[in-house]
Amino acid sequence: MNKVSINFNRFLKCSLIGIVTGIANGLFGSGGGTIAVPSMVLILGEEDHKAHATAISIILPLTLVSSFFYVMSGFVNWSLTGQVMIGGVIGGYIGAKLLNICPTGILRKAFALFMILGAIRMIM
């Protein structure tokens, strides 16, 4: 394989990951990271810490697009948004700091546990 086909294959994988992540984010209001992080690690071979940090960067523009449509449709509870946003900003800061010191093995296990608990909660 030449370099052009390798780059095209990676571009195609990245695009497909982005499309699926965007659909999940738009449809469920979140959840893009649960698709983006494992996809970047397992399909693209990215390191866990970089995958988590990159997922946050990817989700920002996805969330802005989705938010626009949610706001235009009148689905946003602004009181709830403001209240949760305060905690979200604080939690985001703490999480970003913890990512810098968290070993990969613990990060993977914590992320997997979070996904499993979320799945169980959604089923019940």
Image (cartoon, rainbow, N blue to C red):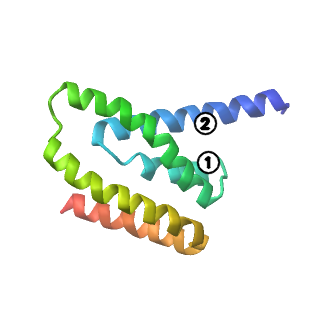
In the rendered view, does 82 fall on the left or right side of 42? left
Crowd tier of the residue under label 1, counting other residues whose Cα lies within 10 Å: few below 14, some 14–19, many 20 or above: few
Q: Quadrant of the C terminus?
A: bottom left
In the rendered view, does 94 fall on the left or right side of 44? left
Across and down, in percent, residue 67 comes to 30, 33
Across and down, in percent, residue 93 comes to 44, 60
Which of the 4 image quadrants contains residue 123? bottom left
Q: Is residue 75 above or below residue 105?
A: above
Q: Are marks 1 and 2 in contact (CB under 8 Å)?
A: yes
Q: Quadrant of the N terminus?
A: top right
* Comes first in the chain, label 1 or label 2: 2
Residue at the image position 60 percent from the left and 60 percent from the top: 49
Q: Amino acid at mark 1?
A: Ile
- Give the farthest residue toward the top: 72
Give the secondary structure at mark 2. helix
Residue in the foreground of this view, choosing between 14 and 75: 75
Residue at the image position 29 percent from the left and 42 percent from the top: 29
Q: Amino acid at mark 2?
A: Lys
Crowd tier of the residue under label 2, counting other residues whose Cα lies within 10 Å: few below 14, some 14–19, many 20 or above: some
Q: CA distance from mark 1 to mark 2?
A: 8 Å
Residue at the image position 47 percent from the left and 32 percent from the top: 19
The residue indicated by pointer 1 is 43
Which of the 4 image quadrants contains residue 113? bottom left
In the rendered view, does 107 fall on the left or right side of 123? right
Give the secondary structure at mark 1. loop
Across and down, in percent, residue 2 comes to 85, 31
- Give the farthest residue toward the right: 2
Residue at the image position 59 percent from the left and 36 percent from the top: 14
Q: Which mark is residue 13?
A: 2
Across and down, in percent, residue 10 comes to 68, 36
Residue in the foreground of this view, choosing between 102 and 93: 93
